[in-house]
Amino acid sequence: MQKSTDLKAVFLYGLTIFLSAFLLFQVQPMMGKMILPWFGGSASVWTTCMLFFQALLLLGYLYTHWVVSHLTPVRQSLLHMALLASCVLLLPITPSEFWKPTGAENPTLRILGLLSASIGLPYLVLSTTGPLVQAWFARERSGAVTYRLFALSNFGSMLALLAYPFVVEPLLPTRWQSLAWSGLFVLFVLACGSLAWRGRHAKPFALPTQDSSTHAKGRQDKASSALPFGQLLLWVALAACPSILMVADTSYLTQNIAPIPLLWIAPLSLYLLSFILCFERQGWYQRRIFLPLMVLSLGALAYLPTLGLSDLPLLWAMGINLTAFFVVCMVCHGELALQQPPTQQLTLYYLMLSVGGFLGGFFVGVIAPYAFDGHYELSVAVVLSGLVVTLCLWRGWPVLSSGLRRPLFAVGTCAALMVLTAVSVNDHMQEADGVEMKGRNFYGSLRVFAFPVDGYRSMLHGQIVHGKQFLAPERAMEPTTYYNADAGAGLAITTQMTLGPVRVGVIGLGVGTLAAYGRPEDTYRIYEIDPLVIGMAQKNFSFLSRTTAKTDLILGDARLQLEGESAQQYDVLVVDAFSGDSVPVHLLTREAFEQYARHLKPHGVLAVHITNRFLDLQPVIQTAAEKLGFTARLIDHPGDNDRLVYASRWALMAKDPQWFEQNALKTAKMLDPRPGFVPWTDDYSSLFAVVK
């Protein structure tokens, strides 16, 4: 009977830990998806969300450390049950419309405020569960291995992370996701509340008995003494390095190697997997194996940008990058696992890990976008990881305790760190060659390059070209890249121009290339969310200053601006706010297309840029056109290097099907049908449904 009761108790502890971790990592992408349309679909929304969740995790661990250290078991139980009950009153979780931006407000502060109001308390309570329940478990079952519960927690996190894009998002609209999450949260409240009630009369942590061994007495003395500040700082640093590296490497992968949507899953999954392996049991992390691999991995991460992306096949570049990233995470988390303190210091240990994770997220999410003019975080993470691991080994690796090994280790690691730094600095100096202007903000980093020999100037967002312009005055107003007259947007505008003056709306400024078509009687109204883009387009390019058309620049998210405006009566509305292959889904939902249709004249045309290496957006366009009663056609263009023209694919949508009967549009093709495709709405979308 006692054995059965013990098994039930262990199951309840495991269930509570697993549910809390699963819910933590389900709510992150769910809330991110809900608010992404409000902030321009920027990848920085995810970074800011991650910063918020790391901050709440830190507060949760701080709460746990305080209640375990200062409250009696009965007071711990009563306080936590009160918090659990309060969370239920806030269900279901939905972001308030109050937090929708209206213009150029600081996105970071608004996102943090929105998340605090929408999910703050439930997430805070969930974040306390890991260390708090482990402390309760250790208090009830003296001598039990609590760190395996930490591995179970990370397994739940990774399962939730993988389940969201592959199962939850494709099957459930966001309102049902919210309801399902809220239902599981109620189950978690019941399980955690049961544990709190069960442990209300428990005794404080059991100390070793009088007949314990000398080793046990030594552990007791260690537990009772205050940890040195250097030890705490080392825990923080070892936790911070993988945190910085994870976010920085995700940004590097999506901007430089392959901007495949949801590629952020891979680094985060490997990050969690390293936690699971290192804390599930000792033995997965072996210094003799992983330390040599780390030297190679740091070198690979530092040298990959220098190789040039075209020098390696896509899968090779991604494979090397992710393998190297995983090795560094294994070393940092493995060293943390080797320094696990006694259970009496468990909550302080987890608090330091949380501080490190938060500082890493804060550095990448808040400091870097506003302090740096480029993406230097990956280089910082590589060098810092090497330095921190070096100090960790210098401080506590028995192999270095005697002989010449210690000075040789110091010389070797210093030389290696200097090489890593030199490679990283050299790479960033090469990136700056030819740069006329660069800057960075919440929406990313921008650079303007001048190539006098080739005769043009270009703007890049990361590695994605936002536009080019010929330097020669006689060619300066030639439309380039995706906007030539025989490609989709240019074809739509020039065709409408034959009927008289045109009113053109453009979502996404770039360098202002489409303004080259403007005549004195025309009007161009251009929506751009990034003030940095506007500044560079006006200062470094002349499309806007030389056009004879009237131009209006509207700062803010185009979707929100269109929703707040009266019907603009556009002859042509161009939707081209995509950054390379990254897709702002909120501009492709049924509700978005309804807004576009509202702003078009009866004979107006919608031009949507759908050039993409990884996604086939035809079914999105086709289902939206059918819903609105529009006719949709494809315009494919092969490109022309001599004219600085890229290969492109545009979808043109017209209210009047006769519009496509004009001679200039004879090359337009029917869209490929996709039977069974579920139309995208603000409540439902799945990128996996359109993967090529």
Image (tube, grey):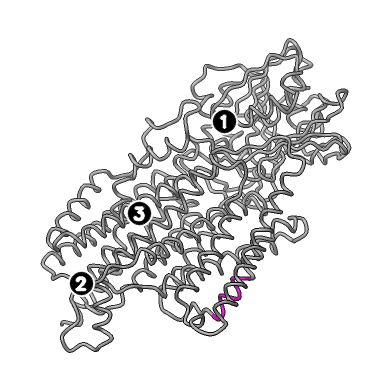
Q: Nearer the viewer, mark 2 or mark 1?
A: 2
| 214 lies above or below 642 | below
Element class at badge 2: helix
Side (left or right) of 215 relative to 576: left
Closer to the camera in the image, 504 or 402 = 402
Indicate the position of residue 421 as horizontal and vertical percent values: 64, 59
Asked if residue 501 lies in the magenta stretch, the reply is no
* Residue 139 tag number: 2
Assess whether mark 1 and mark 2 are in contact (beta carbons under 8 angstroms): no
Q: Nearer the viewer, residue 155 or 284?
A: 284
Q: How crowded is mark 2: few (under 14 residues within 10 Å), some or many (20 or more)?
A: many
The crowd level at tag 1 (other Cα within 10 Å; few <14, some 14-19, many 20+) is many
The numbered disc on residue 230 is none
Q: Position of residue 94 (x, y in %)?
A: 36, 40
Work out how far the residue at label 1 is from the one at label 3, CA to CA, in angstroms: 32 Å
Furthest-top residue in this view? 521
Quadrant placement of the N terminus: bottom left
Q: Which residue is drawn at 45% across and 48% down?
A: 362
Secondary structure state at the residue bearing disc 3: helix
Q: How far apart are marks 2 and 1 (CA)?
A: 53 Å
Q: How crowded is mark 3: few (under 14 residues within 10 Å), some or many (20 or more)?
A: many
Name the residue that disc number 1 marks. Answer: 529
User: Along the horizontal axis of the image, is 1 left or right of 660?
Assistant: left
Task: State the extent of the magenta-drawn residues as a range.
Answer: 288-295
Where is residue 280? Give x, y as percent.
40, 75
Q: Indicate left or right for 69 with 267 as reference.
A: left
Image height of 69 relative to 45, above or below: below
Query: Which mark is first along the chain, 3 or 1?
Result: 3
User: Which residue matches tag 3?
Assistant: 58
Residue at image point 64% right, 27% down: 535
